[in-house]
Amino acid sequence: MLIIDGDYPMAIGALEAGRDLRLSIEEVRRAEAIPSMFKWPDDGTMATLPEMRKAKIAVALVKIAVCVKKPGHIHGEYRSRESAHAAGRGHLAYYQLLQTEGESRILDTSSKFTSHMSKWEEVDNYDDLPVGMVIGMEGADSISWPEQVHEWYDEGLRVISLSHYGVSYYSHGTGTGTDGGLTPLGKPLLREMEKLGIILDVTHTSDQSVREELELFNGPVLASHQNCRTLVPGERQQPDDILLEVIRRGGVIGASMDTWMLNKHHSIDWELLRIKRRPVYASELITLEDLVDHMDHVCQLAGNSKHAAIGGDTDGQGGSDGAPDDVDTVADYQKIADILSHRGYSSTDVENIMYKNWQRFFEKWLP
């Protein structure tokens, strides 16, 4: 069965970790190490372009993911809006070059998305097909001022979350609690996004910020990799009222593979996550059954299977060491279909969750 992955911060692995993601998964995993600030080793890499084809991943929402370090928070790779902008441009250039080389196809319009999916649905062997990519931005620090988003749109950017970790230039995000809201720049950015038809991603954003976003923004909304606080405590997950509003507005909610977002027994502790993630949020404690619990919860909230999906945070969550125990590479995402079937989901429901919900959403909302 085909898959659409709602979150793959691919450029981080390529640029920050120095991985050649055109190679097989085996070649990347055994490559000679190079000096890097990236904290997850190559031998746990879950995705490369050949592995995505093997996994039948027709499309991924790939991310430009750059943060400016703010006082009081450990996360952030850059110290100025200028360097963040330049780094984000580098992520974008990487995706554009992959398209030039024939490895991928940037799907920035509805018609491109539809024709790309038709090609994948017509064949059984995907080795020679480009992988589809919708370009998103995880945290908007690469956008130097709100009106600059028009330049990014012209280059193919179609999805934006205002924050990632800490307080971005536009809103409070993960690790800041649930109460902080939009900054003074948040409202004008949302206004420009709405003019352009850019999709708002509410992932990694504080509860108060999301509620303010949904009050101000009338455009399309999704949650690319966002699990359910009802099942797992912690402010990184979202409460039911926010999930219900995303559903009401026709959005799709991708379930994330992060073990620390799937462990029912431990609320997320940012200090623990930094110093001893492995023993507290160990992969062995989590399986894909736990992931499917979150998909099922979204389906129960919606009363149907039209809003749950995969949002892997693939290789952004620690690679295989930070994924459920029964996931080694993205090829194991196919196991989700069997779990859903065993729980009584129909073939139509399974197809919705594996790829058709994302397909319908992007075909509707891309220009």
Image: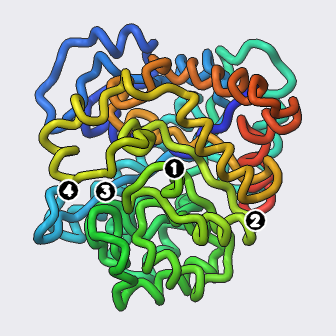
In the rendered structure, the answer to whether residue 317 lies left or right of residue 74 reads right
Q: Which badge, 2 or 1, is on the more N-terminal residue?
A: 1
Q: Amino acid at mark 3?
A: Val
Give whichever of 207, 148 is nearer the camera.
207
Question: Is there any visible trace of residue 94 in the rendered image?
Answer: no
Which amino acid, mark 1? Leu
Query: Tag 2, which secondary structure?
Result: loop
Residue sitting at x 15%, y 51%: 271
The residue to which callout 2 is attached is 250
For image coordinates 72% across by 26% down, the residue present is 337
Residue 344: x and y in percent read: 81, 30
Whether tag 4 and tag 2 are in contact, CB under 8 A, the answer is no
Of badges 4 and 1, the one in the foreground is 1
- Whichever of callouts 4 and 2 sits on the residue coming sooner in the sequence is 4
Mark 4, residue position: 75
SS type, badge 4:
loop
Whether residue 153 appears in this view of the structure is yes
**Identity, as a three-letter code, of the amino acid under mark 4:** His
Of the two numbered discs 3 and 2 on the same chain, state the one appearing first in sequence. Answer: 3
Residue 231, disc: 1
* Residue 253: quadrant of the picture: bottom right
Residue 125, position as x, y percentages in the image = 74, 13
Q: How many marks?
A: 4
Depicted 145 relative to depicted 234: above or below:
below
Image coordinates for residue 321, horizontal then vertical, percent = 33, 25
62 sits left or right of 308 in the view = left
Q: Would you name the residue on which mark 3 appears?
A: 66
* CB contact under 8 Å: marks 3 and 2: no
Instruction: Classify residue 215 by image quadrant.
Output: bottom right
Q: Secondary structure at mark 3?
A: loop
Residue kind at label 2, given as amino acid type? Gly
Residue 366 location in percent, x, y? Answer: 72, 60
